[in-house]
Image (cartoon, grey):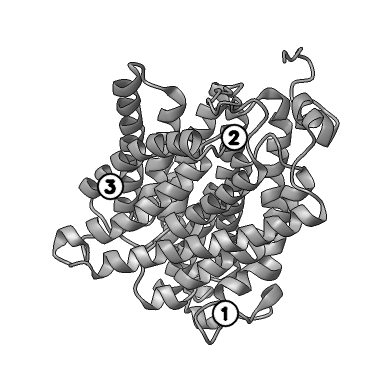
Amino acid sequence: MKRKKILVPLITLLMLLLPRAVCASEGASPESNAIAIDAVWTLLAAFLVMFMQPGFALVEAGFIRAKNAANIIMKNFMDFSAGSIVYLLFGFAVMFGLDKAGVIGVTGFAMTDSFEHLGLSIPIWVFLMFQTVFAATAATIVSGAVAERIKFGAYFIFSVLITAIIYPVVGHWIWGGGWLAEKGMIDFAGSTVVHSVGGWAALVGAYLLGPRLGKYSPQGKVNAIPGHNITLAALGVFILWFGWFGFNCGSTVSGTDSSIGLIAVNTNIAAAAGALGAMFYTWLKYRKPDVTFTLNGALAGLVGITAGCASVNPAGAIIIGLLAGMLVVISVQFIDNKLKIDDPVGAVSVHGVCGALGTAMVGVFAVEGGLFYGGGTALLFTQLLGIVSVFIWVVLAALLLFGAIKAVVGLRVSEEEEQTGLDINEHGMHAYADFMLKS
């Protein structure tokens, strides 16, 4: 009994001292521990952002017809699969390589550079992984807007090219030390870099493809084409909302950054405000709270807060979310009814338009430098310059690339293929093979 009384405290003491002894033997220090924490945090955030890919896939699949569900899943799957390799070989260097004009990176292709000029506190491979999942997000935004009528091969080529050149160029301007970064533009996690890039490319693709069969009558009347599974779409939105905490909070690339808490709160309440804004707007206008607009309202709030999540306070985040939630409804109706551009999932409005709104609102609500906080108009003008510049670049580049793809392999499937569905014609299968699909 006495031996047991002696052994218990002795074992406890050894357990307390052993970790310290191991750390000392491995040369651990507060600095190395901080680097390890930052690296693990950034990887965890990257994995959360990667989980947004199935979120996008479910949203888009739910918002379109069942006969095209397998096709849209395949597009999202290839965005990440092909994009991961293309970004490693080419896109990362364009975005973060050294340059002389502030326009495009020209060193470090295929990761042949150490990228020491970035001054990172985390290993370069950790940073690459984090940036890869962002690149995949920008690419996958396009798939929803061109759904149900684009050839799979044509889409695959464009997905590769947006990851290799269109997105990384914008990333270099704002995040890679380019000319907009030098002017002081703020886009903390990518309202413009990621979302508006995808949104404006989606706008060009949807415009060039033309509307789906039956979307508009000969007289120009809009015919609704309901999605086949709102439950899937809602699940996708919840997944995106969850993954967005990695998107925004992870952009600190530091687990020891005290701003993570504020960023998380701003992200959450902007999404909530966006959902409320869209719901109440449709409730007042149509006498019924619209489910699909409310889902897109939450995404609009998330997109809107992404640029300024580290720069605004919670009050600003709520206002940005509310504005984005209402704007997404107005924008979808304008693009659909006035411009006659068929965007089945509202990608242009959610990501392009609300991404621009959120970027501009940094110039208004940023606690340091914002118009409402005594900062004058300098930051707002810089934000607007960035929005316009990115719009011009993406639209021109997308027009050129889509045009080249159309000339070489064609963009749109035949009318017969569109009527029977892309699943069976492009992939030789149905997403719901055990169910009889009604035309």
Q: Looking at the picture, which amino acid does disc 1 mark?
A: Phe
Of the numbered discs 1 and 2, the one sitting upstream in the chain is 2
406 to 87, vertically: above or below: above
Of the numbered discs 3 and 1, the one sitting upstream in the chain is 1
Callout 1–callout 2 Cβ contact below 8 Å: no
Q: How many C-alpha atoms fall within 10 Å of the one at disc 3: few (<14), some, or many (≥20)?
A: many
- Residue 173 percent across, percent down from the top left: 48, 72
- Asked if residue 426 lies left or right of residue 315, the reply is right
- Residue 304 percent across, percent down from the top left: 37, 48
Quadrant for the C terminus, please: top right
- Residue 133 percent across, percent down from the top left: 58, 55
Quadrant for the N terminus, please: top left
* Residue at (65, 32) in percent of width and height: 212
Q: Looking at the picture, which amino acid does disc 2 mark?
A: Glu
Q: Nearer the viewer, residue 227 or 48?
A: 227
Of the numbered discs 2 and 3, the one sitting upstream in the chain is 2
- Residue 394 percent across, percent down from the top left: 55, 61
Disc 3 is placed on an element classified as helix
Q: How many C-alpha atoms fall within 10 Å of the one at disc 1: few (<14), some, or many (≥20)?
A: some
Q: Looking at the picture, which amino acid does disc 3 mark?
A: Ala
Check disc 2 and report the residue beneath it: 60
Q: Nearer the viewer, residue 399 or 309?
A: 399
Q: Nearer the viewer, residue 369 or 23?
A: 369
Check disc 1 and report the residue beneath it: 115
* Residue at (57, 29) in percent of width and height: 63
Q: In this orientation, does residue 190 appear? A: no
53 to 94, vertically: above or below: above
Check disc 3 and report the residue beneath it: 317
Q: What's the CA distance linking mark 2 and mark 3?
A: 26 Å
